[in-house]
Amino acid sequence: MKLDIINLNNDITGQIDLHPEIFGLEPQEDILYKIIHWQLAKRRAGTHQVKERGDVRGSTRKIYKQKGTGKARHGAIRGAQFRGGGIIFGPHFRSHEYKINKKVRKLGLKFALSSKLKEVHLTIMDEFNLSSHKTADLKQKLGNFNAKSILIIDNNVNENVKKSCANIHTINVLPVAGINVYDIIRHEKLIITVDALNAIKERLA
């Protein structure tokens, strides 16, 4: 399985063999869905919190006597049935993270990479370095790709590339250590440098 290597000027500089066990698999949507759901669950802040009866300010005194008033029986004003009272069974601060087997996570990455090759949205570059951190320079270099969003994966991310991507929400860059299923799938185009490709092969093969 061979793919052309191009440079930033879109010229072909050579060819490279892609590992069939990483890029030649038939993607399984259920695995990809499971991994993406797991990633998004990990990212959730989990800071939602409500005040229960014991957290609300107010007296704990019984508002009126138990019998003889003709009204319903009530305790303190902090009860959930009163305006401004505590909430029953409301959300609390917690982590939404759960565990997924490492083998499944590894398989998910392979499926995500294979899907990009299958969709003809994978490009291999000899390197991705910029001499300037200007956003306009990056846009000009990537103008040929005609993609709504682009993810660049490099082994050692160039500082100028990192800075120039910061102002463009449709173009992102990740080191090999940070690659994940969610970011690969949500970007239309995937660009991987030769160095990054070798590092991915060591990590996943």
Image (cartoon, rainbow, N blue to C red):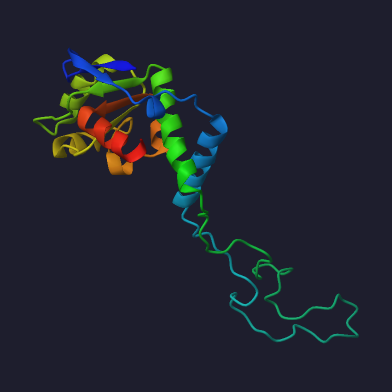
Seen in the picture, residue 47 relative to 200 is either above or below; the reply is below
Q: Does residue 197 show up? A: yes
Q: Is residue 21 left or right of residue 34?
A: left
Seen in the picture, residue 80 relative to 141 is either above or below; the reply is below
Q: Quadrant of the N terminus?
A: top left
Q: Is residue 204 left or right of residue 197?
A: right
Percent across and percent down for residue 100 are: 51, 49
Q: Quadrant of the C terminus?
A: top left
Query: Viewer-proximal residue, 72 or 90?
Result: 90
Residue at x 18% of width, y 34% of height: 161
Percent across and percent down for residue 48 are: 53, 59
Q: Residue furthest top?
A: 11
Percent across and percent down for residue 202 are: 29, 38
Q: Is residue 67 left or right of residue 180?
A: right
Seen in the picture, residue 50 relative to 17 is either above or below; the reply is below
Query: Viewer-proximal residue, 188 or 6?
Result: 6
How many numbered circles are shown?
0
